[in-house]
């Protein structure tokens, strides 16, 4: 959302959201071929040796910025952003290693950032002067 331009007060505000989930794993008969290589009469599928990760990343943010024009050339700027991010991961037990265990992890963070400043518009230099 933005304000009309060329006003004494101009602003922009918005929202952001992202929800990312990745998944890899095993399939019957070795159909999961990432990490595979073949040698003569021998095949090795490295995917069978790895746990099955499922990372997820959710992020949401709200932001805004305002410019208050003191004159046509000089303005005061203020802006802020709030962000929340949550990252989770799950690695399943390796079906080819009975001693392996599933592992879960989670972390989240909140952050507020901002800025304040002056904006000055210099006169453009005319050609030939």
Image (spheres, rainbow, N blue to C red):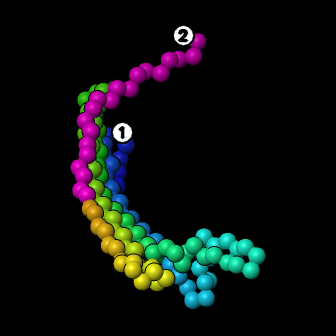
Does any portion of residue 112 appear in the rendered image? yes
Q: CA distance from mark 1 to mark 2?
A: 28 Å
Residue drawn at 32 percent across, 73 percent down: 104
Residue farthest to the bottom, as pictured:
28
The magenta stretch spans residue 110: yes
Quadrant in which residue 83 is drawn: bottom left
Q: How many marks?
A: 2
The residue that appears at 35% across and 51% down in the rendered structure is 2
Is 63 above or below relative to 122?
A: below
> x and y percent of residue 99 in the render?
39, 80
Residue 68 to residue 39: above or below: above
Say what secondary structure mark 1 lies in.
loop
> Alpha-carbon neighbours of circle 2 within 10 Å: few (<14), some, or many (≥20)?
few
Quadrant where the C terminus lies?
Answer: top right
Image: magenta residue range: 109-129
**Residue plotted at (60% across, 70% down):** 35
Residue hosting label 2: 129
Residue at image mark 1: 6
Residue 111 is inside the magenta segment: yes
Nearer to me, 97 or 86:
97
Identify the residue at image location x=45%, y=80%. Answer: 97
The answer to whether 78 is drawn above or below residue 12 in the figure is: above
């Amino acid at each position: 959302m933005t304000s009309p331009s060329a006003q004494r007060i101009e602003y922009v505000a918005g929202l952001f959201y992202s929800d990312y989930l990745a998944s890899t794993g095993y399939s019957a008969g070795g159909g999961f071929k990432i990490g595979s290589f073949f040698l003569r009469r021998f095949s090795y599928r490295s995917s069978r040796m790895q746990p099955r990760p499922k990372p997820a990343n959710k992020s949401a943010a709200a932001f805004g910025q305002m410019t208050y024009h003191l004159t046509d050339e000089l303005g005061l700027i203020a802006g802020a952003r709030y962000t929340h991010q949550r990252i989770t991961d799950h690695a399943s037990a390796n079906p080819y290693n009975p001693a392996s265990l599933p592992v879960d992890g989670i972390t989240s963070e909140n952050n507020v950032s901002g800025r304040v400043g002056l904006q000055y518009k210099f006169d453009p230099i005319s050609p030939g002067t």
